[in-house]
Image (cartoon, rainbow, N blue to C red):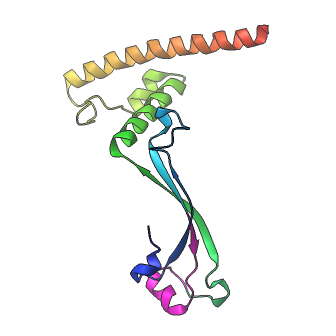
Amino acid sequence: LRSEEDRGIGARFHIQRVKNKFFDERYPNLIRTNALINLLLLYPADAKAFKKSGIRGKWDAKFAGKPCASVEVQLTLNDYLTIKNLMHTYYDVMRAEDPRSFLIENPIFVDADTLAPAEDEKDIAAASARVERLELELAAAREHEKGLVEARMAE
């Protein structure tokens, strides 16, 4: 990984940290899904570099070469990202007070290959069956959570 300045763009950054979770055995397998790169972005050193950088506005000498932002770049494989997005959807359904209304307003994907939303009668029937399964899972999860709370209160 090289600074963009090396490529003639004019922007500059310093690598602050690289955390490659793919191969870090300190994390459980379900966390080992990405690599993180923290970068310190530096304000261009001169007016010429500022112009090449594409930053809007006018160059200000008092900021030359000083840090202007710290950012994190996350590198994730597409399959992991798909799973993460689907888990978010499931979590949103579980949190909803009324899962049926939530799913009507926020359709979830039904085709595992294309991730296409329900469009025809067959898809709608499959989605409806999924809603019923999710409602059962949600009820079970809420009962489990209630049991955990009650057990803690009893301690």
Residue at 60%, 64% (x, y): give it.
Answer: 70
Q: Quadrant of residue 144?
A: top right
Residue at 38%, 19% (x, y): give it.
Answer: 131
Q: Position of residue 146 (x, y in %)?
A: 64, 12
Residue at 39%, 42% (x, y): give it.
Answer: 81
Q: Quadrant of residue 8?
A: bottom left
Q: Position of residue 45 (x, y in %)?
A: 57, 86
Residue range of the region highlighted in magenta in the rendering: 39-57
**Most distant residue in the right direction:** 155
Pick the front one: 52 or 27: 27
Residue at 61%, 82% (x, y): give it.
Answer: 65
Magenta span includes 9: no
Q: Quadrant of the C terminus?
A: top right
Q: Position of residue 79 (x, y in %)?
A: 33, 40
| Residue 89 visible to the viewer | yes
Q: Position of residue 101 (x, y in %)?
A: 45, 25
Q: Is residue 111 above or below residue 148?
A: below
Pick the front one: 11 or 23: 23
